[in-house]
Amino acid sequence: MTAFRDEVRAWLEEHLSGGFAHARGLGGPGREHEGHEVRLAWERLLGAAGWTCLGWPKEYGGRDASLADQVVFHEEYARAAAPARVGHIGEGLIGPTILEFGTEEQKRRFLPPIQRGEELWCQGYSEPEAGSDLAGVQTRARLEDGEWVITGQKVWTSLAHVADWCFVLARTEPGSQRHRGLSYLLVPMDRPGVEVRPIVQLTGTSEFNEVFFDGARTAAANILGAPGEGWRVAMATLGYERGASTLGQQIGFQREFEQVVAVAKRTGAAEDPIIRDRLVRSWLELRIMRLNALRTMTSLSAGEPGPEVSIAKLYWSEWHRRLGELAQAVQGRAGLVADGPPYDLNDLQRLYLFSRADTIYAGSSEIQRNIIAERTLGLPRG
Ligand SMILES: Cc1cc2nc3c(=O)[nH]c(=O)nc-3n(C[C@H](O)[C@H](O)[C@H](O)COP(=O)(O)OP(=O)(O)OC[C@H]3O[C@@H](n4cnc5c(N)ncnc54)[C@H](O)[C@@H]3O)c2cc1C
């Protein structure tokens, strides 16, 4: 594993120079607007060198890498402050779902362009009336002349404004209720009948969107699983949402934590006993998170995922939100003022504002607690 770590580190060091030197640190939550073009070029360089989709089978462009090696890659990636990936929804969500449910033809059509960074994806699940309660999906689709015709509205669709494709959960059996009658469709974004409207978020930037489908079309073959089986496929995708990249994210958290400590020293906040207590607590919790990540990795490698995935999501998102609050506290009153109008935020202000979203996306904290309550503690359904 050390040799692999050395190889990743050396490659990143060599290539994050020259034209890509200024790409370090670009992008990520609350900063997805930064340097899209250079990050896309970087994604393609990574793909060409075989550093995307490491866990995928070799025949679809991957390396068949072990989970441990994937975590090492993500750790080194974060350590090098390499630019936030523009292809992470393709690699982390739809790719593994296609591997699990796709036909051979679908695998050959869709996986290589994701691996090469040529096609970007977005996730079309949430709707105005279907968030935590996803079974309330109302977007509908019907087959007409060999194509699915889709009508409805999605919301909070991250990166839809740069995506080439969207995986859409839609109701394909008229009159069906809840989990039944849904299908999982793969829909091109550059067609008539698809409209993307950015949503301005707390950070002043727009990385998610409303997506309107008004008679948008996709080929009849662009469905994962059978018609009506969409719920099962959609749940499998959610299971991938907290995969290897999440396990490696503590390195990025560590860097943010160090930044908070540095500011606390500079402003004198570090002398306040309450702030000191909160900083030490935060550091301890970061250690615990790392140990938990190792434990999760062991159970995932053994193919025995238990409640760890929900525990991990709950733990890191709540921790990160508290770090955001601490980031504001160490700045004192200066933290309350933007550097420039209207929304020129510093890193810690952005951390504070964006981390409010961490406990909502990928299953809110309340939903994670419900899952643990019902599946692990055997409590009655709420
Ligand atoms: C930054 C960000 C990016 C996102 N990206 C995407 C994306 O790319 N694609 C996509 O499809 N969606 C995306 N989402 C949407 C996200 O999945 C939903 O916001 C989330 O599922 C919650 O749904 P909701 O917003 O409708 O809130 P609601 O479901 O209406 O929940 C409101 C509140 O009620 C609580 N609540 C709901 N049900 C229960 C219950 N049964 N028990 C206890 N409490 C409950 C929730 O925890 C929450 O606090 C994104 C969200 C964010 C914040």
Image (tube, helix red, strand yellow):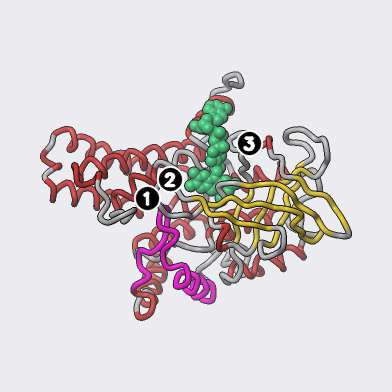
Q: Which residues are magenta?
A: 22-49
Q: Amino acid at mark 1?
A: Gln
Q: Secondary structure at mark 2?
A: helix
Residue 261: in magenta span: no
- Label 1 sits on residue: 250
Tag 3 and tag 2, C-beta contact below 8 Å? no
- Label 3 sits on residue: 129
Q: Amino acid at mark 3?
A: Glu
- Mark number displayed over residue 293: 2
Sort mark 2 into few (<14), some (14-19) or many (20+) by Cα contacts within 10 Å.
many
- Marks 1 and 3, Cα distance to the nearest angstrom? 34 Å
Q: Quadrant of residue 103?
A: bottom right
- Marks 2 and 1, Cα distance to the nearest angstrom? 9 Å
Is 29 placed left or right of 158 in the picture? left
Give the number of marks: 3
Tag 2 and tag 1, C-beta contact below 8 Å? yes
Is 357 placed left or right of 331 in the picture? right
